[in-house]
Image (tube, rainbow, N blue to C red):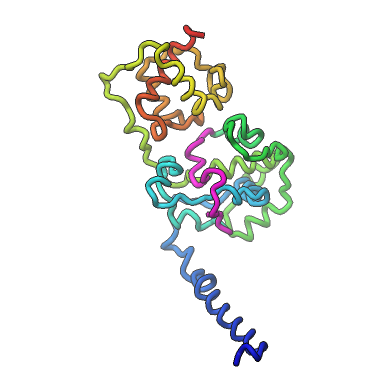
């Protein structure tokens, strides 16, 4: 009986475990990350982005945030940000991958598409004080990342990972902080693949007019919509912040509708057509156009 001979039992158990490990963990590396898995648009990380990724792992961000948009429609609508579900070829340069399994916070696979600001202003504000942009957030503050980046091993990392880099890439690390690095990494996530702007379909008909001409009738709901979606960047009293002040506007109602619907990529403003219906967007337009008169 095997249970009476512990040495043989341990050896056989080890053999069984190793067979399972080989089949599920070792053998697959023979055929993954091959030329067929790669997507031409997906580029390796730059030294700054790689440093940011290492800080992301060091701080345990993957314990609360996943990085994989599943093929479920609800997942794509909530986290796809126009980029759709995740493809295997997106992760060929991720060592290790950070798919994760726990969503205490939102999925970040497409966060670079949601906040495309080239200066990363939203990310900086969010990391320094999460509740300044998401009042209900239980995420800790990472203001301590505003310290000089240690670049001692940067070139060695790039060589080890066999990522291409230039001296200019390494020089770009000079004077950077850990905050700069993690923001660079966050801004890359999801941006390599070409994206079809689904928000463009949210344009109202050319002859459609704003159905809400009287602010008093919609002010309470408009303020609530603004507080949930806009206040983090434009101020809780519409006084401005990351974005401009929104107390009155010379733009037409249709122009404001288009901006709210599709966003302004150059300024890092996301589009809201995926989360707000036309009625809510029109109410925001009314608040922005007429709010100054009522303050």
Left or right: residue 97 versus residue 217 is: right
Q: Residue at x 48, y 63 (%)?
A: 33
Q: Is residue 78 magenta?
A: no
On screen, residue 256 above or below 22? above
On screen, residue 37 above or below 149? below
What is the span of residues highlighted in magenta in the rendered image? Answer: 96-117
Viewer-proximal residue among 163 and 214? 214
Examine the rendering and report whether any part of residue 50 can be seen.
no
Looking at this view, name the residue that lies furthest to the left. 207
Residue 247, percent from left and from top:
50, 13
Q: Locate residue 11: give its quadrant.
A: bottom right
Q: Locate residue 6: give its quadrant.
A: bottom right
Q: Residue at x 40, y 13 (%)?
A: 217
Q: Is residue 112 magenta?
A: yes
On screen, residue 149 above or below 292? below
Left or right: residue 223 versus residue 206 is: right
């Amino acid at each position: 009986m095997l249970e009476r001979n512990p040495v043989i039992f341990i050896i056989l158990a080890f053999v069984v475990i190793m067979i399972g490990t080989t089949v599920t963990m070792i053998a697959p590396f023979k055929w993954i990350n091959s030329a067929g898995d790669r997507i031409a648009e997906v580029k390796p990380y730059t030294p700054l982005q790689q440093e940011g990724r290492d800080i992301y792992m060091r701080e345990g961000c993957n314990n609360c945030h996943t990085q994989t948009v599943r093929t479920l429609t609800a997942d794509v609508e909530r986290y796809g940000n126009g980029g759709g579900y995740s493809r295997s070829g997106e992760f060929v340069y991720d060592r290790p991958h950070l798919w994760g399994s726990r969503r205490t916070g939102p999925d970040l696979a497409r966060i670079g598409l949601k906040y495309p600001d080239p200066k990363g202003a939203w990310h900086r504000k969010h990391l320094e004080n999460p509740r300044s942009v998401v009042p209900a957030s239980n995420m800790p503050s990472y203001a301590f990342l505003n310290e000089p980046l240690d670049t001692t091993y940067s070139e060695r990392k790039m060589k080890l990972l066999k990522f291409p880099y230039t001296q200019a890439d390494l020089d770009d690390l000079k004077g950077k902080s850990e905050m700069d690095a993690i923001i660079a990494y966050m801004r890359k996530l999801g941006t390599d693949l070409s994206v079809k702007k689904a928000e463009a379909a949210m344009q109202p008909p050319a002859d459609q007019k704003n159905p809400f001409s009287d602010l008093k009738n919609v002010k309470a709901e408009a303020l609530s919509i603004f507080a949930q979606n806009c206040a983090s960047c434009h101020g809780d009293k519409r006084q401005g912040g990351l974005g401009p002040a929104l107390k009155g506007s010379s733009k037409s109602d249709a122009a404001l509708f288009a901006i709210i619907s599709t966003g302004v990529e150059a300024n890092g403003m996301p589009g809201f057509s995926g989360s707000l219906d036309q009625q809510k967007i029109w109410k925001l337009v009314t608040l922005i156009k007429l709010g100054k008169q009522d303050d």
